[in-house]
Image: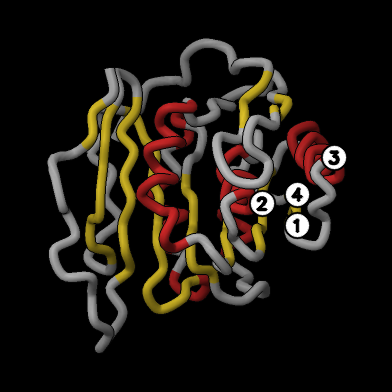
Amino acid sequence: MKTPPDKGRPPGKVRIIGGRWRGTRLEVADAAGLRPSADRVRETLFNWLQPALPGARVLDLFAGSGALGLESLSRGAREALLVERDPKLAAALQAAIARLHAEDEATVVRADALAFLRAPLHGRFDVVFVDPPFAGNLWKGAVDALAPWLAPQAWLYLESPAEAAIEPGSDWTPHREGRTREVRYALYRRVADGADTLGPVIDGPPATLA
């Protein structure tokens, strides 16, 4: 499947939208493929996720600016592991964590995300964010490698080009999704063997942002 190259330059800063660090701005470096999720997309996503965040362990693959992992901590997650390959972005993440005094909660791993997933050494996670650079077509490789990292009924967030048909497979059931002109963003729940699911998981029409 072909995906379009990332368009435009990243904004200079993104803000944490809710929780204890609400309003804090995170620096966004000018790096190839970096495309932080828009504020309105993240606000919608975290409204969906909020009940699952308190006490959760979060894995933010392709962390970039760290907006997803750090927003999770701001809203009550217990721990966030942020994986970023680019050394400049990884250093910016470390600086942001230090500024927030979050060293006991957030860990940055400088590594290629797909290589990192081949050695599951960090336990199991309740929430996983997969929002890679669009040009790399990395969604399938990441999702296929996730199983050893996941809690029984983990949540998975995927962000992809608006026209791309990215689906995580039969191990996941859709919860909510939305679109803007540029991206599709979707939240899934893992189907654990013998576990009770949430019943009807689509409780309304997909959200659409202009």
Sequence-first tag of 4 and 2: 2
Tell which of 39 and 138 is nearer to you.
39
Q: Nearer the viewer, mark 3 or mark 4?
A: 3
Question: Is 144 displayed left or right of 24 in the figure?
Answer: left
| Image location (x, y in percent) of residue 62 | 58, 43
| Image location (x, y in percent) of residue 97 | 79, 45
Count of marks, rendered view = 4
| Image location (x, y in percent) of residue 50 | 44, 54
Q: Which residue in the structure is indicated by mark 1?
A: 107
- Give above or below for 45 relative to 133: below
Tell which of 209 and 32 is nearer to you.
209
| Image location (x, y in percent) of residue 25 | 69, 27
Q: Secondary structure at mark 1?
A: strand
- Give above or below for 24 relative to 118: above
- Give above or below for 162 relative to 154: above
Q: Residue at x 25, y 48 (%)?
A: 176
Sequence-first tag of 2 and 1: 2
Label annotation for residue 99:
3
Q: Which residue in the structure is indicated by mark 2?
A: 82
Sequence-first tag of 3 and 4: 3
Label 2 sits on what residue type? Leu
**Label 1: few (<14), some (14–19) or many (≥20) C-alpha neighbours in 10 Å:** some
**Label 4: few (<14), some (14–19) or many (≥20) C-alpha neighbours in 10 Å:** some
Label 3 sits on what residue type? Arg
Mark 2 and mark 1 in contact? Answer it, CB < 8 Å. Answer: yes
